[in-house]
Amino acid sequence: MSNAYIDQFPAEAKVIRAAFYSSFFALALGGVFGIIQTLHRTGYYRFIDSADYYTVLTAHGVFLVISFTIFFLVGIFTWAITTSLDRGVEDLRFTWGWYGLMAVGITLTGVAILAGFTDATDISASVLFTFYAPLQAHPLFYLGLVLFVVGTWFAGVDWFRSWWAWKAENPDERIPLPAFMVLTTMLMWYIATLGVAAAILLFLLPWSLGLIESVNPLLTRTLFWFFGHPVVYFWLMPAYMMWYVLLPKISGGKLFSDPLARVVFVLFLILSVPTGIHHQYLDPGIAEGFKFIAMTNTMFLLLPSLLTAFTVVASMEHGARQRGGEGYLGWLKALPWRDPVFAGMALAGLMFAAAGFSGMINAGMNINYLVHNTFWVVGHFHLTVGTAVALTFMAVTYWFLPQVTGKQLWSRSVALGQVVLWFVGMTFMSNAMHRGGLLGIPRRTAEPQYDGFEFEAAVGSVAELDAQIALGGVLLTLSLVLFFANVVGTALNGRSDDLPDNSYAGTLSGPEDAPQILDNLKLWTAIAVVLVIFAYTFPLLSIIDRGGLFGPELVELPLSTLDLESISALALAVEQSTIATLETTADTATAVIAGVIP
Amino acid sequence: MRISKGGLLVVLALLAPLLVELRTVLAWVNVELSVLESAAIGLILVVAIFVWAFWPDNGNDGPTSDSSPR
Amino acid sequence: MSHATDESTQIQDPDQPTDSDQVREIGHDEFDPVGALALIGLYFLILVFLWFFMYFVEFLGNDPTVVSGIVSVVTGGVGLA
């Protein structure tokens, strides 16, 4: 008799399995649309109408970054809470309830998107993942998203209930690390989703239903990015959790530092939300000063990511040295590269390191102007969510599937081939996307070629870049096929009694070394809320002031003139000081460079 | 064999990003490679890694034996 | 649960299958993550290098940009690019 997760928590294992299979279904759909789009854009094989490209793009985006990632997240988080608190969920009907709500919600949204392919109904939702107004979707699309997000809220309630019940029984104990990660991530999510909830419920859904005439596009955009940046951490946090609590164990060692891990998650709770405006550096109508504040907050976010890089690598190194690794870099050879779970996560981490650099480019206000809305950005997020997150999820699937199904993995060799193939495919595709972006090739474009104009490549040619993208896309699709073969093959296997135990990594420096204040979730939430208020109150008020709550024609918010004047004055002051700083910097740079260049 | 099969696979995979950007780096020092030439260099490197990996490691099996397959 | 004791008392769990290749036990005080330092240091150097490199690719490689002070340099730097 083994001691796998399914043996400890058979009922919860069923929920997690359902969440995983929902997630994989979305991955399959999203993958199909991905390859269609790759071949269409690069001009290798165009069998859909270019007007339908946006429907494909919407489906690719929504299915992958909403359903694939978040369904997987709820599976992992349920595992983390039950395993680390060592107790089942409080009420299984409630757990199935939120899963059901999420499933119904995403089905409605998915139907609204896919209906765009047929003329039989007038339902469509080709508004892309960002659903910027004035692009308008059928009400079903927004309604489904609302239900899905509310489902995740209830999931959070479920996990908080488990924690409260556990705390009542263990009043003096530290929150176990995985549970701590779940709780901080969910707090961040509650704050973040307020933005999208407001955008949809107050503006986009009533507008789509015809209840209001118009919306203020900049307002709904800003509210979207209020949610849109933290959502990327919502995808990333489960991957981080896996790097912290599973990767050290798989490497044969222990987590280097529990306190550092807690600090990282606290920093993400605090800093994730007040950064969204960095997606809007090119939006007119938001003062430079506000953008500068968002940039500063964003740069602070590099801190938890670099902390993670060090802690995770040090934990891997601990494993490698326990396995006999030696030297400054020689220990890398002692890592279990044959294990697909390890190899997948390590390669995902490596890609994430590269993405860190392109992310810094995106985050810098002045440099961002050069890559904004180009193919570069697409290359960037295929490294982050498309590899750091997706490849980690696929790799840990090879550990989780036996745990929640009670069956042996169908083939470890195929699994290893799959993760390596993903890495190679993404190398080709993402690299060429970055390079294309530098040449100015736009994103979100069905046919990025123009009469009388050619993009000039510094090295090679655009045709070569297209070939790399298509090759990468094909390799990625192949990798997905191998992944699903393994999932299906495992599901068809018989029940096994010889499974690894359900456990996670121990720690070298444990929670007893972490200051007690790290577990004070109320404090961190309060700080996070204050930072959000600082970062968003003035931008939102000034957007409403300029463009009206429901668009320019309608009556504006009843704000006193005094308020508005002080806001504009403040905005102007910040704007001017920023410009002054930039000018000085530019002057200095000019002087330096003039000195360097003969 | 000096490296595990899994390790060899990963090393070959890591070669991909290096090869893809090798042309850009060389163009910086005014060495222009065609796609075919890049592919040829890739092939040579792959063969070199294979030869290294399968070369019997007589003499220094101290540190390398740790990473050989079970 | 195996990890509960693992965490509080820092005893290695003998049942963990991935530990079968373990040849020695390294505790908190003996472990000196020089390898992690080397790797992260290398990454940091690459970042710094790329940051400088970025200037040439993104500014000198393109036409005049929104940052006004740079324009004069672009014309002066064409020979270099």
Image: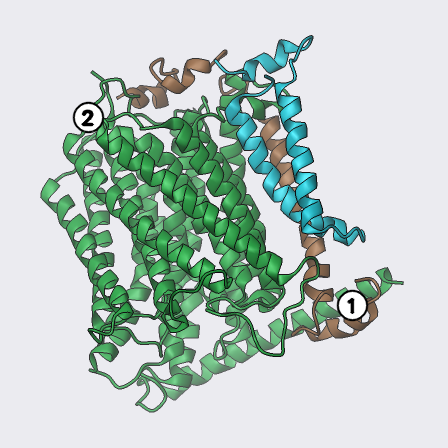
Chain colours: A green, B cyan, C brown
| Relative image position of residue B55 (x, y in whole percent) | 65, 17
Distance from Cα at disc 2 to Cα at disc 1: 65 Å
Kind of residue at disc 1:
Thr
Q: Say if labels 2 and 1 share a chain.
A: yes
| Chain name for mark 2 | A
The residue where tag 1 is placed is: A590
**Which residue is labeled 2 in the image?**
A8
Foreground pick, A552 / A96: A96
**Res A515 seen here:** no
Residue A501's place in the image compared with A576, above or below, is above
Residue drawn at (12%, 40%), measured in percent from left and top? A92
Residue sitting farthest toward the top: B59
Q: Residue A18 at what x, y percent from top left?
A: 20, 42
The image shows residue B43, relative to residue A562, as above or below, that is: above
Q: Is residue A326 left or right of residue A9?
A: right
Q: Which residue appears at 30% of the width and 76% of the height?
A: A136
Q: Quadrant of residue A51?
A: bottom left
For mark 2, give the secondary structure. helix
The type of residue carrying mark 2 is Gln
Quarter residue A546 falls in: bottom left
